[in-house]
Image: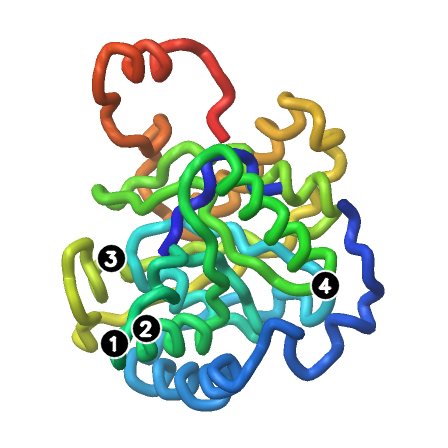
Amino acid sequence: MTSEPSVDPESSPAETAETSKSAEPRHAGFAYALGRSIISPLARLIYRPRVEGKENVPRTGAVIFASNHLSFIDSIAIPVAAPRPVHFLAKSSYFEGTGAKGWLSKTFFESIGAIPVRRGAGQAALDALDLQRQLLDEGLAVALYPEGTRSTDGRLYKGRTGVAFLALQTGAPVVPVGLIGTDKVMPVGAKIPTTKERITVRFGKPLDLAPHGPATSGRARRLATDEIMAAIHALSGQELAGAYNEAPAQGAIEKIKQALPHERR
């Protein structure tokens, strides 16, 4: 799954709640209907996830699921467990393959609510930001990972401010999610998830981040992000890393950039 873009993936919802009461979001097609009616129930039957806090998820209107990130299957576990359709961004390469394998990949990711996006900074990140805003403007639900990328050691890393920026700009509530055991069901490098382990998906109470201030305020974004991460920590029970989850700097320039004080997004 794609990690959170390096620029803040950040507009009040433009449509009324009536939009979100439609049977399926407008992005849905045959594959998505198939996923909701067949793949999700089948996954629940096979993997028997423990799901807690479903009552905390708003059934209509824009909402952001902010989750810890342990495994490739996190973006499958959340849509399977959530009581409403959830969309997330996935690498465009998953949708661009050719032949039977490419068709299967594209169909599978569409069936679980994935939307293709090109990874990277600059314009690619801005395009991802606009897409996420559009989904929330339509009254839909999106899932994001404040840590930015998967934790390879099981610890919970500091959150980047993109999720908070998006919530403060759109006014969408944030539902914190704690995933437990997904790294055991499908560790990094595994090709197929095991059925010997069970996962737990915990949905926390929605967070209204508006009291922290406007999205244009760096302090508001930081405080809102810290509130989100505290809620995720309470749900997941992970050890806190106390640092950002980022690859070691390559080269002198990158090392200097990481050392300088700046707001991680």
- Closer to the N terminus: mark 1 or mark 4? 1
Q: Residue furthest front?
A: 98
Looking at the rendered structure, which numbered label has been put on residue 101?
A: 1
Foreground disc of the pair 1, 4: 1
- Closer to the N terminus: mark 4 or mark 2? 2
Looking at the rendered structure, which numbered label has been put on residue 105?
A: 2
Label 1, label 3: how far apart the Cα atoms are: 25 Å
Residue occupying image coordinates x 28% and y 14%: 255
Residue occupying image coordinates x 38% and y 55%: 91
Report helix, strand or loop for mark 4.
Answer: loop
7 or 45, nearer to the observer: 7
Report which residue position mark 4 lands on.
139
> Is there any visible trace of residue 22 in the rendered image?
yes
The amino acid sitting under disc 1 is: Lys
The amino acid sitting under disc 2 is: Ser
The amino acid sitting under disc 4 is: Gly
Within-10-Å neighbours for mark 3: few <14, some 14–19, many 20+: many
The percent position of residue 83, horizontal first and vertical second, equals 57, 75
Report which residue position mark 3 lands on.
183
Foreground disc of the pair 2, 3: 2
Residue occupying image coordinates x 45% and y 47%: 145
Looking at the rendered structure, which numbered label has been put on residue 190?
A: none
Q: Look at the numbered discs 1 and 2 and tell me whether their residues touch, using CB distance below 8 Å.
A: yes
Q: Look at the numbered discs 1 and 3 and tell me whether their residues touch, using CB distance below 8 Å.
A: no
- Closer to the N terminus: mark 1 or mark 3? 1
Give the position of the N terminus as an image quadrant.
bottom left
In this rendering, would 66 be left or right of 118? right
The percent position of residue 51, horizontal first and vertical second, equals 44, 71
Residue occupying image coordinates x 34% and y 59%: 93
The amino acid sitting under disc 3 is: Asp
